[in-house]
């Protein structure tokens, strides 16, 4: 599959919209790349937010690949980064932590839950 160009610099709205679309297609790695594009170009005070969202999407990618331990670690790291940004990010952080605590995480359901919260 095609990757997101290295010089991709979406606005906040574009990044969220595109990440939602990609998650809806079951493509969390590509959603991660979109969010990473925003992270690299965002104002300093927003970078932790975008990095955390990107990490949660990488966690979803690990989950799809059967790496539950890696998924849980990335869900926790991402949640730690975004939890201070208020709603709806606090809810995304709580959900990511909850997904990381589950032994029977279903990848498709996890992707859908995060997509719906974005």
Image (cartoon, rainbow, N blue to C red):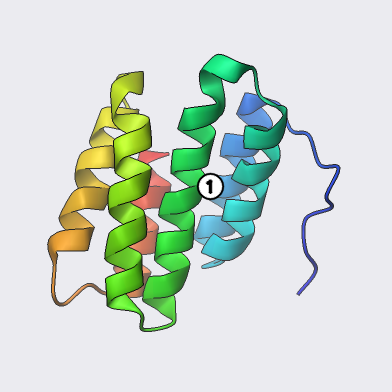
How many residues crowd around disc 1 within 10 Å: few (fewer than 14), some, or many (20 or more)? many
- Residue 105 at what x, y percent from top left? 22, 72
Give whichever of 59, 92 is nearer the camera. 59
33 up-or-down from 29: above or below: above
7 up-or-down from 33: above or below: above
Question: What residue is drawn where x is 34% and y is 47%?
Answer: 77
Residue 44 makes an appearance in the image: yes
Question: What residue is drawn where x is 70% and y is 26%?
Answer: 11
- Residue 16 at what x, y percent from top left? 57, 36
Quadrant in the picture for residue 10? top right
Q: Which residue is mark 1?
A: 20
What is the number of callouts on the image? Answer: 1
- Residue 92 at what x, y percent from top left? 30, 40
Quadrant in the picture for residue 74? bottom left
Question: What residue is drawn where x is 41% and y is 52%?
Answer: 56
- Residue 85 at what x, y percent from top left? 36, 21
The N terminus: image quadrant: bottom right
- Left or right of 93 on screen, residue 111: right
105 up-or-down from 13: above or below: below
61 up-or-down from 93: above or below: below
């Amino acid at each position: 599959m095609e990757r997101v160009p290295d010089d991709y610099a979406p606005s906040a709205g574009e990044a969220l919209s595109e990440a939602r679309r990609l998650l809806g297609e079951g493509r969390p790695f590509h959603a991660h790349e979109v969010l990473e594009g925003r992270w690299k170009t965002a104002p300093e005070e927003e970078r932790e937010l975008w990095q955390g969202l990107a990490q949660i999407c990488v966690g979803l990618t690990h989950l799809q690949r059967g790496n539950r331990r890696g998924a849980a670690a990335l869900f926790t790291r991402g949640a730690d980064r975004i939890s201070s940004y208020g709603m709806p990010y606090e809810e995304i952080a709580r959900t990511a932590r909850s997904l990381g605590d589950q032994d029977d995480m279903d990848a498709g359901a996890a992707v859908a839950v995060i997509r719906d919260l974005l």
